[in-house]
């Protein structure tokens, strides 16, 4: 196995993980009910009822594992709560003083900590890498004019790809109309099951106040920004520091630049070492996600999920290759070949930030982008450029509007283009934040925010999918900008790059 190139091993890990997850999937008809002194796994119930003082509060059927768990968790006063379980063979079980009701975990889920350590290691690298590489990158761009030119091109390119992405999302959602494919019964079930989760996200109170958004990019304390992993603030601080480093005496500046260049290089070496365990980590991450995933809910939301995936595929396999052809001479096949590792890590971690160290390594060592451009464009892109998320937010907003029976006007659709672009910029490059920022888009077009309950169940899997174009777009911008500056080197053959690992 070790003779195979690393990216092949990672892809094998991904596929085997999915198979393992299916084999050791969580049984949707099994529950672990624990009381103070005993715990018991029950299987194949026909009805589970929650009873208090002889009154049946709520009953659930055979397919309601998640509903049962969530109802138990959301019941505040569990004193005198009785669970009556009718089994399919006609017998009944009564549970008093229950302390927990959970799914029965399988080996597929129990291996997850291995993957979690891998994701944490990548995240551990991301913040120092963004800080150090951006300071060095900005300092090496000689003067303010040069930085403004590269920065302007980068942001312009990101804005262009985001608007196209959102338009693709809107077109897919308006043509397929996934919101009209869902039955009122399914809508009610989804709303009931995920109401609590939706409320928790709504309570985070995200708002699109452009002025305070801009004000908040300026950190009061950069060390706090680093500690909190606030990427926008770190980017702001790092660029300013890099820009003005070149204005102090050369002798002093060189010490600081050397320090951050050393830190940045060390982080890159570290990521190459961490990637050695990637095949195993990816295996456990995918196995756990597949094992835990409720395929029943995927069936209910199949049209919505397909619409998102179709939009993301058009974005990745039509828009990006077209832009690559227009702006560079790189072959599309070579570009995507070089992205295999980036793709697998983004998909399995659902985090652009965790993938950044890998993207950086690939852009510099494989795609021939000079360090000063990669270290400027990539951290910026990881933070602000999220085409996949923007597209997903557009589809989700139209889907929820359709389910609620809203007929969106052209003005509302244009509002989606604007707010989804901004919401995606504000989305932190970590798992699941795109869904929270969607609330901003819903608010802007007057669609009830509670509607996010409809899509929470499939968010994890769609998050994995949208993170892929999020990171591919960063690499794309990197080669486009490097090419426009006449600084793009040759693509290195796979074997040579593998040698670095
Ligand atoms: N997981 C996405 C990313 O890191 C962000 C999101 O859409 O939730 O790129």
Image (cartoon, rainbow, N blue to C red):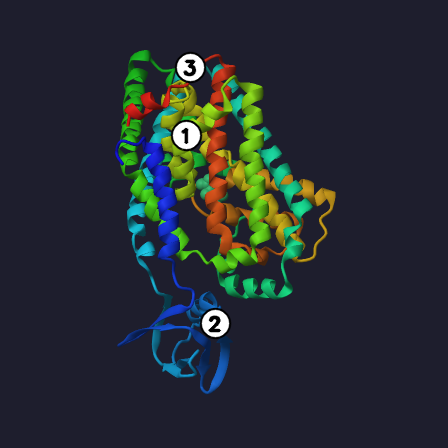
> Circle 3 — which element?
loop
Helix, strand or loop at mark 2: loop
Q: Residue 329 carries which label?
A: none
Where on the picture, by quarter, is residue 163? top right
Question: Vertically, is 423 above or below 337?
Answer: below
Q: Name the residue under label 2.
A: 62
* One can see residue 244 in this view: no
Is disc 1 surrounded by few (<14), some (14 to 19) or many (20+) residues within 10 Å?
Answer: many
Residue 133: x percent and y percent?
A: 36, 25
* Residue 38: % across, % down: 27, 76
Can residue 354 be seen? yes
Q: Distance between the residues labelled 3 and 1?
A: 29 Å
Cβ–Cβ below 8 Å for labels 3 and 2?
no
Question: Which quarter of the rendering shows the N terminus?
Answer: top left
Does 70 sit above or below residue 153? Answer: below
Q: Which of marks 1 and 2 is nearer the N terminus?
A: 2
**Is tag 3's residue or tag 2's residue first in the polypeptide sequence?**
2
The residue wearing badge 3 is 489
Q: Residues within 10 Å of mark 3 (few under 14, many from 20)?
A: some
Looking at the picture, does residue 30 appear above or below residue 286? below
Q: Name the residue under label 1.
A: 237
Q: Nearer the viewer, mark 3 or mark 2?
A: 2
C-alpha gap between disc 3 and disc 2 = 60 Å
């Amino acid at each position: 196995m070790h003779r195979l190139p690393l990216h092949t091993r990672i892809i094998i890990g991904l596929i085997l993980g999915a198979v393992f997850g299916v084999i050791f999937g969580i049984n949707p008809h099994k529950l672990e009910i624990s009381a103070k002194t005993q715990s018991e796994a029950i299987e194949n119930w026909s009805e589970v009822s929650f009873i208090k003082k002889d009154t049946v509060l709520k009953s659930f059927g055979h397919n309601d594992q998640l509903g049962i768990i969530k109802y138990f968790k959301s019941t505040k006063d569990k004193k005198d709560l009785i669970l009556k379980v009718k089994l399919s063979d006609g017998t009944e079980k009564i549970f008093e003083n229950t302390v927990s009701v959970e799914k029965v975990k399988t080996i597929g889920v129990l291996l997850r900590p291995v993957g979690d350590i891998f994701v944490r290691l990548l995240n551990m690298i991301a913040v120092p890498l963004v800080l150090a590489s951006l300071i060095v990158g900005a300092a090496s761009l000689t003067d303010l004019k040069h930085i403004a030119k590269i920065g302007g091109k980068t942001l312009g390119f990101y804005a262009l790809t985001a608007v196209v992405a959102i338009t693709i999302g809107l077109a897919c959602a308006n043509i397929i109309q996934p919101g009209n494919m869902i039955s009122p019964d399914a809508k009610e079930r989804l709303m009931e099951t995920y109401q609590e989760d939706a409320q928790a996200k709504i309570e985070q109170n995200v708002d699109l106040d452009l002025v305070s958004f801009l004000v908040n990019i300026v950190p009061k304390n950069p060390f706090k920004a680093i500690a909190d992993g606030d990427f926008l603030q770190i980017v702001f601080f790092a660029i300013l520091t890099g820009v003005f480093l070149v204005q102090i005496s050369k002798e002093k500046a060189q010490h600081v630049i050397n320090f951050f260049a050393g830190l940045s290089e060390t982080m890159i070496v570290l990521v190459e070492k961490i990637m050695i365990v990637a095949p195993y980590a990816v295996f456990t991450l995918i196995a756990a996600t597949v094992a835990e995933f409720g395929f029943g809910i995927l069936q209910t939301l199949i049209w919505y999920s397909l619409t998102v995936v179709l939009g993301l595929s058009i974005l990745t396999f039509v828009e990006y290759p077209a832009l690559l052809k227009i702006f560079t001479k790189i072959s599309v096949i070579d570009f995507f070949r070089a992205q295999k590792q980036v793709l697998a890590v983004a998909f399995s971690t659902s985090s652009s930030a965790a993938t950044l160290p890998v993207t950086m390594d690939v852009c510099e060592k494989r795609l021939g982008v000079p360090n000063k451009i990669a270290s400027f464009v990539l951290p910026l892109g990881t933070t602000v450029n999220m085409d996949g998320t923007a597209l997903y937010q557009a589809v989700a907003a139209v889907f929820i509007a359709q389910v609620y029976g809203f007929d969106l006007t052209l003005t509302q659709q244009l509002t989606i283009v604007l707010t989804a672009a901004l919401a995606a910029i504000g989305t932190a490059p970590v798992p699941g934040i795109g869904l929270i920022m969607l609330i901003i888009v819903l608010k802007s077009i007057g669609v009830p925010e509670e509607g996010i309950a409809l899509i929470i169940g499939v968010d994890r899997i769609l998050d994995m999918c949208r993170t892929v174009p999020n990171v591919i777009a960063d690499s794309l911008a990197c080669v486009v900008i490097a090419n426009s500056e006449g600084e793009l080197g040759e693509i290195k053959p796979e074997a040579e790059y593998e040698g670095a690992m």
